[in-house]
Amino acid sequence: MSGTGKTITTGDVALFTSEAGKMDGQPIVLLHGGLGSRADFEPLARHLVSDYRLIAIDSRGHGRSALGDATLTYRQLADDIAVVLDQLELNEAGIIGHSDGGIVAMRLAASNLAQPRFVVAVGAHWQLPDDDPTREIYRGVTAQEWREMFGQKIKRYEGENPDPDFERLFEATKAMWLGKGNDAYPNDTVRTIATPLLVVNGDDDILVSREHAFELAEQVEGARLLNLPFASHTVLEDNPTDVIPAIIGFIDRVQEKSRPGSGSKVPQS
């Protein structure tokens, strides 16, 4: 997604939003993962831009959005995004969320903050028990290791963020990943999600296991599960063509059910 767009003020920060695609098409909000940005959706967007209106949001502290002083939690991110959706009149837009973005999308769908037409959650945890191996990964990773793995992304962040401080952002994000309680993962609240949900997971995702993705799909009535062999946590960036047919088919199915006379309507949360 491009570097042109506008900012929406929420609380103590201004969040950057960028739009592309068919302006009169069905709106889809794109929520990126932790320590990423709207740019992570560029490979996927190329396959959706001709038919949909795409709205990518840099979450608090990421991309071109300021971090502010509030504690970074999934609840805070959901509250932030809810304000943006309200101001842009996108409360009923579909949402595609990757990793942290998927977690935020599920929190939104499980609350009354928004009524998304659908949610596609890719590589996203719905809970993170104390004994989940991913917690050990999060505890062990350092800012320097992240720089070595994702140097180009950090360089982009430092070049466009209004107040770049990667070490501060990294520690705030890591604390969010390790968070517990009502401000953290959605946990059992996902059972209240009434909007159509597509869970996407890769067999080679080192953070989110196949079992975890299956459990999430089982928690939400009517949810669909797409498990991709050989796909990693960054499947939307690495192999968007593997995911696109299922996403478009899912969206078409949602639209079909919402048409007058179809016999059913898209449930609202």
Image (tube, helix red, strand yellow):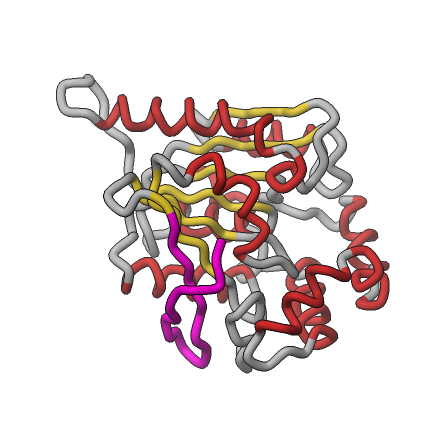
Q: How many marks?
A: 0
Residue 72 part of the magenta segment: no
Vertical side of 254 occupied by 4: above or below = below
Please provide the residue range marked out in magenta: 1-20
At x 34%, y 45%, the residue is 53
Residue 117 relative to residue 168: left or right? left
Q: Is residue 18 magenta?
A: yes
* Residue 7 vertical placement versus 191 (above, below): below
Nearer the observer, 13 or 19: 19
Residue at (48% x, 31% y) in the render: 198
> x, y percentage for residue 240?
58, 33
Residue 56 horizontal/vertical position (percent)? 45, 54
Quarter in which the C terminus is drawn: top left
Asked where in the image residue 195 lies, by quadrant, the reply is top left
In the displayed structure image, the side of residue 29 where residue 233 appears, left or right? right
Q: Is residue 243 left or right of residue 172?
A: left
Q: Quick check: can you spot residue 255?
A: yes
Can you name the residue that lies furthest to the left here? 261
**Residue 191 vs residue 145, the one in the foreground:** 145
Please tell me whether residue 266 is drawn above or below residue 133 in the rendered image: above
Type of secondary structure dominating the magenta stretch? strand
User: At 65% across and 61% down in the image, what residue appears?
Assistant: 35
Q: Is residue 115 above or below residue 76?
A: above
The answer to whether residue 194 is seen in the rendering is no
**Lateral position of residue 96 relative to residue 159, left or right:** left
Indicate the quadrant where residue 237 lies: top right
The residue shown at (60%, 43%) is: 124
- Where does the image place residue 54, in percent across and percent down from the top left? 39, 47
Give the x, y percent position of residue 260.
Answer: 14, 24
